């Protein structure tokens, strides 16, 4: 049976794009629902659109333009689509045809941007593939490395090791200091909050496990150290509830908004520099991007992998 797809749009876009687009979908085996074809004089708008078109749709294409983003009717159709997405998994596919402001509810959803309304076959192919589920639901593979072994290591740490790692990461996120001095970090009112021997042993164990990197110096009891990517990932995964969503937002900004520097991502998300830099390091470690870094701390993102698009589509 042909998949049913509802096309939400402004009337101003019908002639310049929507009619031809919907026709091409139908010619490709998709039952595209368009008000011009489905509604007759005397029909109830609410009943036809919300009870027939949207209710039965397996996917909803939202055509975003300078006209549609300000249309109350389109907003109502979008709201209903989001409810259906939550309730029964209806796929929402934003198709952007103008340089317009994308609704907040769609900013973390992968868009398909069409720059030339007379030549968009590649975009049409991607939309059709998404509707038929060719790319949206691939076979299940192994989770990304940054969601695996770190989680398994955290429970195995002793209480003091968890405490040392947590305090270290919190300080690093706040100060972006990179090099941590335990004789400053763990001192309160002139006294170490953790006994020196236990703190030293804990740092040695965290170093051996790959959560920190000690900079051992002859003649000092407590060495300075850095939080490794693995250590920061362990902390963020265990202690920050919205961390996975933050990763998704950063990926969306890179893919959809073409943001190419840590400065842009920090300004947009309002997250700490250390957190954004860590997520970028993870993406590079997993082969999704390449990074170039300057002495002043600026990070430039380039060679973005197509795999990031699929991560957003999941």
Image (spheres, rainbow, N blue to C red):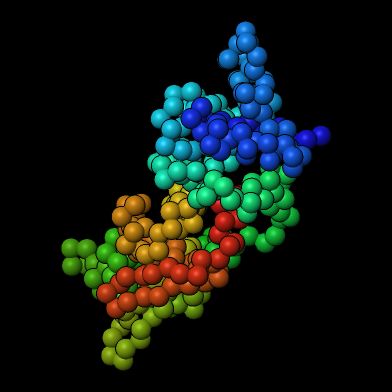
Task: Name the one closer to the observer, 112 or 243.
Answer: 112
Can you say whether 258 is above or below 200 in the image?
above
Is residue 106 visible in the rendered image? The answer is yes
Q: In the picture, residue 8 is in which quadrant?
A: top right
How far across and down, in percent of the image, does residue 251 sit?
48, 56
How many numbered callouts?
Answer: 0
Question: Where 242 sits versus 193, above or below?
Answer: above
Taking the image as shown, residue 311 lies to the left or right of residue 265, namely right
Task: Give the image location of residue 110, x and y in percent.
Answer: 54, 48
Residue sitting at x 72%, y 50%: 134
Q: Residue furthest bottom?
A: 218
For the N terminus, the image quarter is: top right
| Quarter assignment of residue 185 | bottom left
Q: Is residue 212 left or right of residue 113?
A: left
- Give the residue drawn at x 59%, y 61%: 307
Give the vertical position of 183 relative to 93 (above or below). below
**Residue 122 placement, left or right of 196:** right
- Front in this rendered view, residue 314 or 95: 95
Q: Nearer the viewer, residue 248 or 14?
A: 14
Q: Residue visible at 74% across and 40% down? A: 27
**Which of the two residues, 275 or 76, is positioned nearer the viewer here?**
76
Q: Is residue 160 visible?
A: no
The location of residue 109, given as percent across then percent down, is 52, 45
The residue positioned 64% from the left and 48% from the top of the image is 124
């Amino acid at each position: 049976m042909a998949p049913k797809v509802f096309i939400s749009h402004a009337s101003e876009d019908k002639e310049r794009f929507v009619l031809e687009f919907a026709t091409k979908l139908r010619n490709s085996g998709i039952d595209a629902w368009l008000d011009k074809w489905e509604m007759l004089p005397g029909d109830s708008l609410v009943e036809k659109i919300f009870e027939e078109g949207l209710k039965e749709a397996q996917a909803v294409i939202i055509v975003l333009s300078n006209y549609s983003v300000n249309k109350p009717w389109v907003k109502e159709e979008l709201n209903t689509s989001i409810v259906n997405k939550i309730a029964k998994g209806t796929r929402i596919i934003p198709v952007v045809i103008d340089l317009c402001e994308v609704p907040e509810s769609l900013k973390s959803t992968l868009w398909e941007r069409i720059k030339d309304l007379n030549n968009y076959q590649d975009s049409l192919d991607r939309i059709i593939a998404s509707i038929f589920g060719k790319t949206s639901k691939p076979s299940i593979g192994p989770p990304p490395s940054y969601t695996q072994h770190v989680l398994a290591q955290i429970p195995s740490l002793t209480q003091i090791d968890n405490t040392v790692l947590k305090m270290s990461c919190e300080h690093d996120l706040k100060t972006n200091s990179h090099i941590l001095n335990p004789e400053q970090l763990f001192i309160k009112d002139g006294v170490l909050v953790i006994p020196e021997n236990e703190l030293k042993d804990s740092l040695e164990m965290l170093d051996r496990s790959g959560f920190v990197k000690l900079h051992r110096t002859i003649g000092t009891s407590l060495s300075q150290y850095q939080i490794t990517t693995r250590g920061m990932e362990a902390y963020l995964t265990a202690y920050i509830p919205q961390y996975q969503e933050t990763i998704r937002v950063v990926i969306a900004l890179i893919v959809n908004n073409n943001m190419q520097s840590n400065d842009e991502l920090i300004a947009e998300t309002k997250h700490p520099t250390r957190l954004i830099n860590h997520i970028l390091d993870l993406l590079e470690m997993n082969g999704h991007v390449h990074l170039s870094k300057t002495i002043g701390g600026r990070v430039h993102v380039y060679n973005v992998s197509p795999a990031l698009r699929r991560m957003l589509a999941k």
